[in-house]
Image: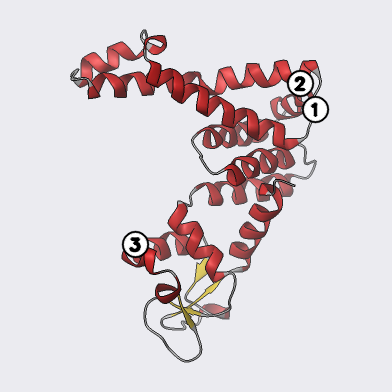
């Protein structure tokens, strides 16, 4: 990275994580016994007074930096391209906001890289696609992701009870059995899995990963890679 890029990273980190301070300080104040109104009032002025807040801000800032570095792009060019289109600016901003709250390094890299691909795309359809993939993956919590990754390794699945030759998610991931219903509901709502066949024909309790679900996982592997 050039000296100019380093400066741009630092500036962007400062801007993206500045909104974290108030949130953290309010939380610290509440934990220490302040009422909600007082805690809210403290938020704007006391950000630098809490070591806990400083640690959180530093940690989240490092993730924003990691997401930007992972793009491998000239950052001035990236930011200029984003400023020229409100959709691209929104995509980049949201990706960095999500990255700062994500402990998973793979997804931090993914957020930075997929946002950069959208920002630098000349085709509106590509921008929309990158935005949709980013937004959908950002909705997944660790249990959702674990189930989806498993389901991409097979064709047809049962949720809990065996049927025919289909594999059973509950048997292969017993640690998520208690949250399988909300996991399946979220994945289905995002269009990543379906209980319907082609033409909307119901398959009963049989579930499959959609083409979009497989695309999201393929992009997560490609863009989240450390290589």
Q: Relative to residue 225, is residue 192 depicted above or below?
A: below
Please identify the quarter of the rendering in which residue 38 is found.
top left
Q: Relative to residue 156, is residue 24 depicted above or below?
A: above
Marks 2,1: beta carbons within 8 A: yes
Q: Which residue is mark 1?
A: 74
Marked residue nearer the N-terminal end (1 or 3) = 1
Q: Is residue 151 visible?
A: yes
From the top left corner, tell me how far across and down residue 106 is, in percent.
Answer: 61, 46
Image check: 86 left or right of 52?
A: right
Residue drawn 59% across the image and 29% down it: 64
Marked residue nearer the N-terminal end (2 or 3) = 2
Image check: 69 left or right of 195?
A: right
- Between residue 136 and residue 22, name the one nearer to us: 22
What is the number of the mark on residue 23? none
- Check the image and name the residue furthest to the top: 45
Q: Which residue is mark 3?
A: 179
What is the number of the mark on residue 5? 2
Marked residue nearer the N-terminal end (2 or 1) = 2
From the top left corner, tell me how far across and down residue 57 is, in percent.
Answer: 48, 22
From the top left corner, tell me how far across and down residue 148 is, in percent.
Answer: 52, 64
Tell me the CA gap for discs 1 and 3.
42 Å
């Amino acid at each position: 990275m050039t000296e100019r890029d380093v400066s741009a990273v630092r500036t962007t980190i400062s801007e993206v994580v500045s909104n974290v301070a108030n949130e953290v300080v309010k939380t610290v104040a509440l934990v220490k016994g302040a009422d909600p109104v007082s805690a809210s009032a403290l938020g704007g002025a006391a950000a630098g007074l809490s070591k806990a807040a400083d640690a959180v801000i530093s940690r989240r800032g490092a993730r924003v930096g990691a997401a930007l570095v992972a793009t491998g792009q000239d950052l001035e060019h990236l930011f200029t391209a984003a400023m020229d289109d409100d959709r691209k600016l929104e995509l980049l901003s949201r990706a960095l906001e999500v990255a700062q709250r994500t402990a998973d390094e793979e997804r931090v890299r993914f957020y930075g890289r997929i946002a950069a691909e959208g920002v630098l795309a000349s085709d509106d359809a590509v921008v929309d696609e990158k935005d949709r993939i980013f937004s959908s993956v950002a909705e997944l919590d660790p249990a959702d992701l674990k189930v989806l990754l498993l389901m991409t390794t097979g064709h047809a699945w049962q949720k809990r009870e065996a049927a025919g030759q289909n594999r059973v998610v509950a048997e292969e991931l017993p640690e998520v059995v208690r949250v399988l219903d909300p996991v399946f509901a979220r994945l289905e709502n995002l269009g990543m899995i379906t209980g319907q066949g082609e033409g909307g024909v119901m398959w009963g309790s049989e579930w499959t990963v959609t083409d979009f679900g497989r695309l999201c996982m393929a992009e997560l592997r490609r863009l989240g890679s450390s290589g």
